[in-house]
Image (cartoon, helix red, strand yellow):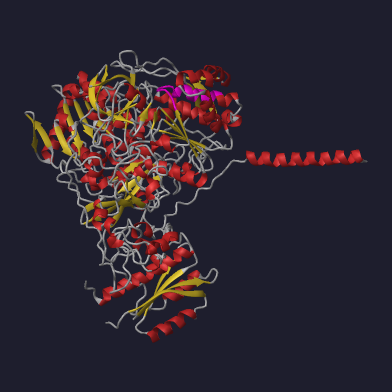
Amino acid sequence: MPIKSYLAHPHQGKKQELVHELSSISSCEVIPAENNDLVIVVTETNNNTEDDILKEKIEAIESLKLLAMVSGFDTPKSN
Amino acid sequence: MKRIGIISLFLILFLAFVAVWNISYREGQEEAYIPIENENPMPIIPSEIGVFERSKFALDYVNMPVDENHQRTLETFYNNRAFHGAPPSIPHPVASERGMGENICLKCHQNGGFVDKFNAYAPVTPHPEMVNCRQCHVAQVTESLFEETNFHKIKAPEVGVNNALDGSPPVIPHQIQMHENCLACHAGPAAPKEIRVTHPERVNCRQCHVPNNKETRDIGEFKRISNYDE
Amino acid sequence: MYTSLTNRREFIKKMAVMSAMTAAATMFPGILFAEEQERNLPENANLDWKKAPCRFCGVGCGVLIGIDNGKAVAVKGDPKSPVNKGLCCVKGYHSVISIYGKDRLTKPLIKKNGKYVETSMKEALDLIASKMKETISNHGKDAVSIYGSGQWTIPDGYVASKLFKGCIGTNNVEANARLCMASAVTGFMTSFGIDEPMGCYDDIDHADVFVLWGNNMAEMHPVLFSRLLDQRLKRGVKIIDFATRTTRTSMAADRSIIFQPQTDLAVANAICYEIINNGWVNKSFVEKHCNFKKGLTNMGYGLEDHYSFDDKPEGITFEAFKTFLQDYTPEKVAKISGVSAKDIKYMASYYGDPNKKVMSLWCMGMNQHTRGTWINNLVYNIHLLTGKISEPGNSPFSLTGQPSACGTVREVGTLTHKLPHGVVTNKEHREFAAKIWDVPAENIPAKPSYHTVEMFRALDRGDIKFMWIQVTNPMVTMPKLKRYRDACEKEGRFIVVSDIYPTPTTDIADVILPSAMWIEREGMYGNSERRTQYFEKMIEPSGEAMSDTWQIVEVAKRLGYEKQFYYNEDTHIEEIYNEYRRHHEGNKHAMAPLEVLKAEPGAQWPYVNGKSTKWRFNADYDPACSNGEQFHFYGNPDGKAIIWQRPYEPAPEIPDDDYPFWLCTGRVVEHWHTGSMTRRIPVLHKAMPHAYVELNPEQAKEMQIQTGDRIKLTTRRGEIILPASVNERGVPERNQVFVPFFDENMLINDVTLDAFCPISKQPDYKKCAVKVEKV
């Protein structure tokens, strides 16, 4: 059950788009900064494969300039 | 010819002087307008000020032998405060009633060290830049009370119960406002023995230890914004 | 420790968010995540933190109060508050402990045959109402009075004024702010025609030089003083302590200048002389924005009953003002003031330097002064002559000592001559207030009745028979106290006291009502910089304690004023505040809506177009300026400020052969006012358990006095014995002694003098003659 948090930097002026795109992905939690072009993304997936797919999906978003992982946790299977 | 040159040189200098003087005079006449900054609410993310404040001593702390005969305990640490997070009172006689921090208190409390007179190590202040020490810290000159109180002293955080998982780094179980500088209390010979950090050399404390207390109001469980059902 | 897996996942997720936010904050300092940061991390929830203004002084620090299971258990500074930016003083940090003293009053008490008997709130309120009715019908409406305080919340003072002035029809409404702020008010009114400072605390961040006029800020306004010290660290500002005694403030200041009591009047004039003599006058400012006036002199000191004084202002020319100042050359003034001509010139040079922004700060030293209005005027003169006013950093700033001295007493107007908007002597103002209060305009008498000292004298004489005292402790604070204590105990007087603890004032009460304190109820305070702050009810009141507002509302209903006191118990604070705001409509004084106060750490009036006004009278910041110029002093009809010709006059009682010392009284950092709250905080009591008398160390040695020796102080009013303090907290000059007034077991006010400023009627607690003996 990997849980990861990232800092996502949007392209110039594309923050809203990025927030919108990210929010539409169901396993993403999005926290946009109020006064900077920066978005915190927290992902929660069921296994590593899903996590890899999700990451690719995020990285494919056009308004995203840079994605930097901050922390990652993995907990044993649950639910 | 030479004379004309000199005259014109002085003329140019004079004109330049007039011009410069004019500009500076006009600037002096302008009203100094200081724009009002919007009253942005200050961030409630606990401040980062002072996190690395004492990190230059980190390696000294590692090499420092533990003086077991003069250790403070967490209990005495908490007993000196009206509630955990309150400014501690001064448990010893003070050198001057009128002195300001830089001359009096900070002599010992800026960097600590063993004080023969009190047979103890001086605790290090996490905020040496605030010099009106006795604005918040007062001595205790009597044991008696004016009237008894029913004030409920809440339980202070304990040691060893703050990790989410076995072996994971404990969270910070207390307020850090005014004491953002971790090493001031968690390292060195005056640190209470229970909370003395085993690895002071890893100075970026908050890389692994995060604050864990609510600052304003309870909002209940963490809820995801998006959901599979939608 | 067991944690379920889902909890653990939540926990980890929070950790993930937190570490991302921490990382973001290192990359972009000051980054904001509105929702998230407020939410923070509720796991292992410990305390609920709720915002309030501090209960104690007039600085008005924002505090966050930690609530645990319905109890207030912790305090920290509110980092969002622009006043204190997260820092408090020792009183603020421990303030919540003062709610929980073991001897808290929890039930109403009625005195029967010399003993206090517990009763119900209903019975006590019935008794008060019937006693008021009886007094009014037997002795007239001017035989009842209310004496409140700068610790009244805005709604407390508002309903008191509405009941007494509007409904009953007597101007017998006074407040203890008369003893601490009145000279500041009359200073503003005479110089600018409108009350309260033009500047704000932000001036501290812009000024280059700070002159403290008789103000021991390090102990009395420590949070603001720390802002000064912070600016010195960052910008190298200069702090000048101009005082009669050496204190912590003097030690911290860049320059400590000591003057002889009362001679601040002469020194201020000498500074004006220097400014004019050196050509430092801002001519265009003075021509456009100032008038010169003089008033009556040799006014007396109000020592006799029925004393009254009306100033007769008269316009003068700049030349006449200049001639007047010839008597105040630095050399001449040096002789009477003990301040060297060099030091006077030094201070004048900062005020005169056009490249230095100067902030003057003062509090009781200038206000508790038999010429308090004059010395306030004189400091404004300095700022007006140099045009250093109403601009960021250029600011004469009058500090206050009570949390709502400004908000309630000055803005609501709980003084005998005041109305929420304007004064009782003005017909239009009376009609305006009467309309909002829903009473006939004739109800409000056109003549002010008694100011505080005269009100207690009237009680002594028997002109007043009934007095209701709320949130204050006059039996510790009145000057020449013994006369007024005896007055209260006289036959035929009925005294009601609303308080939270037994005090010397409840000791003389016929009925004691237990009050809900601070965060046990809802309310607002207004601080020194025109900032109004709201606090919600956070905990339940102790026992049957009731808010002062609701006590008055209940009595008003019993007196038959249900129509005017229509408020609903659940929403009355909001209803009262909204009604009160109507008095202040308009650009000059509009108050912020309640929603704004609830959401923000206070708002500064005039609150216009959704914005606080930081600097008044300056067209760049103040929307009420309308004359098309940079500055507009719209408080006066012609839009100009007044520079007053005010001479030096000596104090009423000067040390002589029989009483060779000056006696000065004041406060200490640990205790607030009469200590009825702070002495019940163990940390503070243990730090400062009792009063003392401070002596000059050299002189103490000559008199063979050491710290702790018993010293008898004798004045023409009486005597008192106190322990000596030599070379401790403060060092007085030779032939001067200082005593803090917080200690109800050593009542220094038994021996002080009840002389007051004839214009403001504020007593002078800082100067009288005393004999000092070792016993």
Q: Is residue C174 left or right of residue A62?
A: left
Front residue of C552 and C252: C252
Quadrant in the picture for the N terminus of chain C? bottom left
Residue C284 occupies quadrant: top right
For this orientation, the residue located farthest to the right is: B1
Front residue of C245 and C703: C703
Coordinates of residue C103 in the picture (x, y in percent)? 15, 41
Residue depicted at 23% across the width and 35% down the height: C470
Coordinates of residue B218 in the picture (x, y in percent)? 29, 62
Q: Is residue C564 above or below residue A36?
A: above
Residue depicted at 44% across the width and 67% down the height: C23
Quadrant in the picture for the C terminus of chain C? top left
For this orientation, the residue located farthest to the top is: C657
Coordinates of residue C501 in the picture (x, y in percent)? 18, 38
Give the magenta range.
C258-273
Residue depicted at 14% across the width and 46% down the height: C543
Q: Main secondary structure of the magenta part?
A: helix
Coordinates of residue C47 in the picture (x, y in percent)? 26, 58
